[in-house]
Image (tube, grey):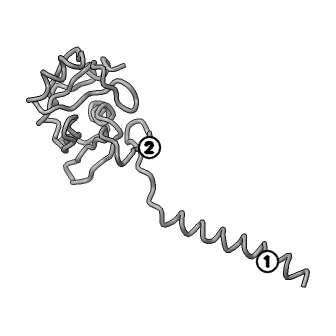
Amino acid sequence: MRASLKKSPAIFALVLAAQLVSACKDKPAEARCGYCGMKIDAQSAWRSEVKRPDGKTDPFDTPRCAFGSVTKGDEPAGSVVRVQEFYDRTWQDSAQVKFAVGSDVTGPMGADLVPLLPAHADKFAHDHAATKVVAGADVNAAVLAELR
């Protein structure tokens, strides 16, 4: 009887380990930012993406990282940065919004580009002390450098 009692905890541990391995395999991998490697919070209003011409979408944790990847040349020509508008959180192509630079609103990694519908841009810039507002087409390495 003693031998069977000694084996029971070992068998229990093996069964538990097998269940944990199975559960880990079924769990989807956590999304990571394609630029900085930070885990992407699925609920974050700062999430951004780059839609490639082939239809593939690359996830990013912030607009700054999405534009960083594009300006660095990590994304193919014709890729489109998509962001969530600051106030209503709707997904927009970067060509449809303006970006506040240098405001007192920060993203999960600090200073970031704040995406705004054109109708909201001037008021936001005034209310949040943005140093400037730029169109999506005007976001480049120099603009990103101002966020440091």
Q: Which numbered dot is residue 113?
A: none
> Which x, y percent locates residue 72?
31, 31
The image quadrant where one finds the C terminus is: top left
Residue in the picture at 16% in, 41% down: 93
- Image depth: mark 2 or mark 1 in front: 1
Q: Which numbered dot is residue 8?
A: 1
Crowding at mark 1 (Cα within 10 Å: few <14, some 14-19, many 20+):
few
104 shown above or below 72: above
Which residue, as the protein is rendered here, is positioned at the far right? 2
Residue in the picture at 18% in, 19% down: 125
Give the image quarter of residue 82: top left
Name the kind of residue labelled 2 in the image: Lys
Comparing 71 with 132, the one in front is: 132
The image quadrant where one finds the N terminus is: bottom right
Would residue 10 appear left or right of 26 to someone viewing this image? Answer: right
**Count of all numbered marks drawn on residues in the image:** 2
> Which x, y percent locates residue 45?
30, 40
Comparing 129 with 134, the one in front is: 129
> Which x, y percent locates residue 85?
20, 37
Q: Which secondary structure lies at badge 2?
A: loop
50 shown above or below 11: above
State how far apart marks 2 and 1 are (Cα). Answer: 40 Å
Name the kind of residue labelled 1 in the image: Ser
> Which x, y percent locates residue 57?
27, 50
Q: Which secondary structure lies at badge 1?
A: helix
Would residue 134 appear left or right of 56 to someone viewing this image? Answer: left
Query: What residue sits right under mark 2 in the picture?
Result: 39
